[in-house]
Image (tube, grey):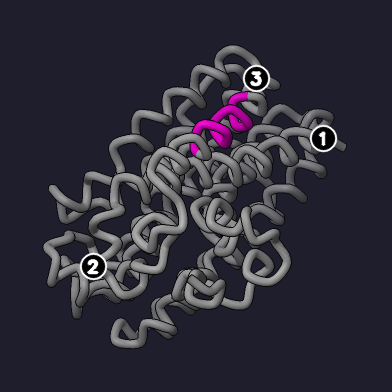
Amino acid sequence: MSDTSARVADSTGNWVDTLAPQWARPYLRLSRFDRPIGSWLLLMPCWWSAALASGMAHDIRGLPLTIVLFFVGAFVMRGAGCTWNDITDRDLDDKVERTRSRPLPSGQVSTKEALAWMAVQALIGLVVLLQFNRFAIATGIASLLIVAIYPFMKRITWWPQTVLGLAFSWGALMGFAVTFGRIDLTALVLYAGAISWVIGYDTIYAHQDSEDDALIGIKSTARLFGAHTQQALILFYGVAVMLIGVALASGDARWPAWLGLAAFAAHLAWQIVRLNIADGALCLRLFKSNRDAGLLLFAGLLVDAVMRAG
């Protein structure tokens, strides 16, 4: 198989396809390093909670290291999760146009090789996790149960995006676990807001595959909401902004954090206005833009933390 044909359908022209050694490319594709948007989206709630918790503690001395560790952890654990997802979905992926070129269904790697690669990534993630306190370590390990069951949810429920939200929003708890050694109500409300955000943006993403999913019996909120997706996004994005706002109020956030939330909300509103579920390329662009939405909120929280620590 030529390297051009080995590329995943929606990720051509990235550094994995052009710069990485040939032998490493299938493994990097398993980890989605050719499509890092998912890692960024996993990272955003981690950074939100780290900044908000540091602001509440009026202490940012540990924040730079926490930001770096969360960055590394998010990328390797998302890679491990994607590898596990591809292992469990290898037969389904062969039936979907966008995913049949992934390393497992296309035969670039074997299942045993994928399992070994997943273990390597999980070990790196464990090394990162061990840099934190015991409560944070236990909190991080607890997320693995959700990660393990997520790939099976689209076979049994119309709401797999909710389970993804539980997993991808876990970082909203981690910042508080690292900073305070506990999870309080502010963290739980931030977590709930992040879950609602994930349901929204992953519904947009799932519209790329809705026709193929219908043919092979895969369930998703994209198929469930259908032509009513924009109304559903108004609900879920609206709830996300409201709950994050409650978390900010609970954490006594100052004006930079609220400005960040306003920019975040404006970005989500722009997505809803722009959405056309029949345009797969647009759905992908809007989905990816959520990294920028998350960074806007993080910027506000970070400035707030610095101001409160001064």
Residue wearing tag 1: 309
In the foreground, 75 or 24: 24
Q: Is residue 194 above or below residue 61?
A: below
In the foreground, 285 or 310: 285
Residue 124 colored magenta? yes
Q: Residue at x 76, y 30 (%)?
A: 58
Q: Earlier in the sequence, mark 1 or mark 2?
A: 2
Instruction: Give the residues in magenta.
Output: 118-126
Q: Are marks 2 and 3 in contact (CB under 8 Å)?
A: no
> Residue 6: x and y, percent?
49, 69
Q: Residue at x 28, y 37 (%)?
A: 149
Q: Amino acid at mark 1?
A: Ala
Q: Residue at x 71, y 27 (%)?
A: 57
Q: Secondary structure at mark 3?
A: loop
> Residue 4: x and y, percent?
54, 77
Give the main secondary structure, helix, strand or loop, of the magenta stretch.
helix
Q: Earlier in the sequence, mark 3 or mark 1?
A: 3
Residue 10 colored magenta? no
Q: Amino acid at mark 3?
A: Leu
> Residue 142: x and y, percent?
42, 24
Q: Earlier in the sequence, mark 2 or mark 3?
A: 2
- In the rendered image, the quadrant that contains the C terminus is top right
Q: Residue at x 62, y 55 (%)?
A: 23
Residue 269 appears anywhere in the view: no
Residue wearing tag 3: 130
Q: State the mark number for residue 95.
A: 2
